[in-house]
Image: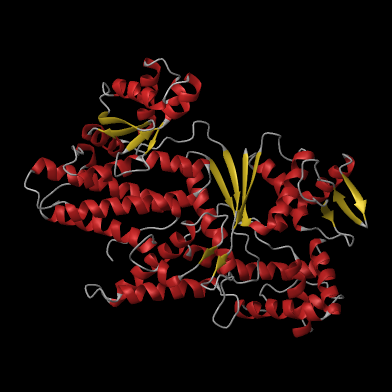
Amino acid sequence: MKKLLECLTEACEEAFEACGYDAKYGKATVSNRPDLCEFQCNGAMAAAKEYKKAPIKIAEEVVAELKKSFYFSSVEAVNPGFINLCITNFIAADYVDKMLVDGDLGYDKEEHPKTIVIDYGGANVAKPLHIGHLRTAIIGESVKRIMRHAGNTVIGDVHLGDWGLQMGLIIEQLRDMKPELVYFDENFDGEYPQEAPFTLAELAQIYPAASARSKEDAAFMERTHLATVKVQNGYKAYMALWEHIMNVSLPDLKRNYDNLNVQFDVWKGESDAKPYIADMVQDLVKRGLAHESQGALVVDVAEETDAKEMPPCIIRKSDGAALYATSDLATMVQREQDYAPERYIYITDKRQEMHFTQVFRVAKKAGIVGEDTELIFMGLGTMNGRDGKPFKTRTGGVMRLEQLISDVNDAVYQKMAENKNMSEEDAKKTARVVGLAAVKYGDLSNQSSKDYIFDIERFASFEGSTGPYILYTIVRIKSILRNFEEQGGVVVEEDMDITSPVNASEKSLMLELARYNEVLTQAYQEIAPHKICQYIYSLSDAFNSFYHETRILTEEDEEKKLGFIALLVLTKKVLEQCIDLLGFEAPDRM
């Protein structure tokens, strides 16, 4: 469905051409002075330079033509050459009425769908999820949904850290804790136990203890490196321990991601790239791209246009161990075989930008991906506390994700408890839904590359640009529609018509709804979920203004009342589609 701005731009282009000017000057935009007009066209200023004519004169000529158009209720030329536009009530109502009956609410999907792999999540096995994992999970899930909604084939891969140094740390710490285990008996040649020699709770203690110890004990650190190499080389005893670590960790990781309403299509990890590493490295050497440097195998990736020094990409360490770059490149080999994607999107901390620049350049130079394959790195800003520093617990530690979610749910519940019409059980259940919206909207409403302040009190507020405010708006609409049906009304979307607006707030709501196609297109093209957040906040404000200024259910004119109800149905559908793209949902009551 053509965007409303496209329709208005076409009308302006025709007017410019009719006056003898290039159509390119006829671009219409949303007004930056809504107190004066709804839309504007500033092309007369630019045209004045080309045609050596006063911009106001050009604007007046174009306005004379635009007044013939059925789109506009008022058109005005304003010094020094602005063209102010207001559309007719009929056009506003007709546009949103067409959205109501369109299966995609008027959204134009991708004309040339792509296969896209999105690498996000990036949790490390054997470590509990903490707040550092929040942004990549939340933003990655939303990006996946936005890409898929546009019509693409999208594969979301968690890409677990399951093959790195943490395995060596856990194994060596376990050796010192339980040296009697058969995994540490070099003479053992039987079958290793099916049951893990540790619980999830024990595993959660083993890693941090090993990590702290490695920073102070050089000999222990050396042992962990050797153990990691053994794992990567397939040493049977350590592979058995690796299996136990995976079996104990994965269910907990999946549970935590489920609580965030984050679902991955593929649960691959660095270990899945192992079968591809040897051939890939050999190919890099054969092509003359990889060479030895101080005992390590590297690929030079520096380019003349680099503003900063770009070090070589290390493919293999001097001790033979693989690195993140090795597994990331081998994973690309695997993904090319499995999916042949036209686009890759990697979502992680922005401090990894150099790493991915190196990996992308090697992938292109070595022909691992095609020249036309898009390789996109989305570097995320940091989630900070009110003090502007990385978010911590009250004791100064890194907060676990479960604790963060629990704290937000508690804050929302305290507000929900004020609603005496809801049982404690229902309030707690609803608080979890609203709490997730508070967390996700609080994160997604910020531009992904920027740092932001995580403020539980503000995010849990039912006022302002917050998740609870958006949900409260949807619940209000649901309540009105329920009351309408309880009064004997019937909601049948295909038989409903949105009628001409009766007041300014209703027209403003229509104009906000009409932006839906444009906003989703921008969010898709710019990979920018925050655009959707900005939109639904404006849409919610527009609806609430309409609600407060309009008698909806008490309207005596039946045609007007049904027009209001149709408008509410569309508003609810647009808001629900948007929050689904952001990764949360609305309850029926709050």
- Judged left or right of residue 46, residue 367 is right
Q: Is residue 253 above or below residue 140?
A: below
Q: Residue at x 66, y 75 (%)?
A: 195
**Colouring style:** secondary structure
The x, y position of residue 565, in whole percent, is 19, 47
Quarter of the image that includes the C terminus = bottom left
In the rendered image, which quarter is residue 413 located in? Answer: bottom left
- Judged left or right of residue 512, residue 212 is right
Quarter of the image that includes the N terminus = top left
The x, y position of residue 22, in whole percent, is 45, 19
Counting labels gives: 0
**Which is more toward the observer, 588 or 108?**
108
Residue 178 visible, this angle: no
- Judged left or right of residue 156, residue 109 is left
- Judged left or right of residue 200, residue 543 is left
Residue 440 visible, this angle: yes
Q: Residue at x 31, y 33 (%)?
A: 85
**Which is more toward the observer, 339 or 94?**
94
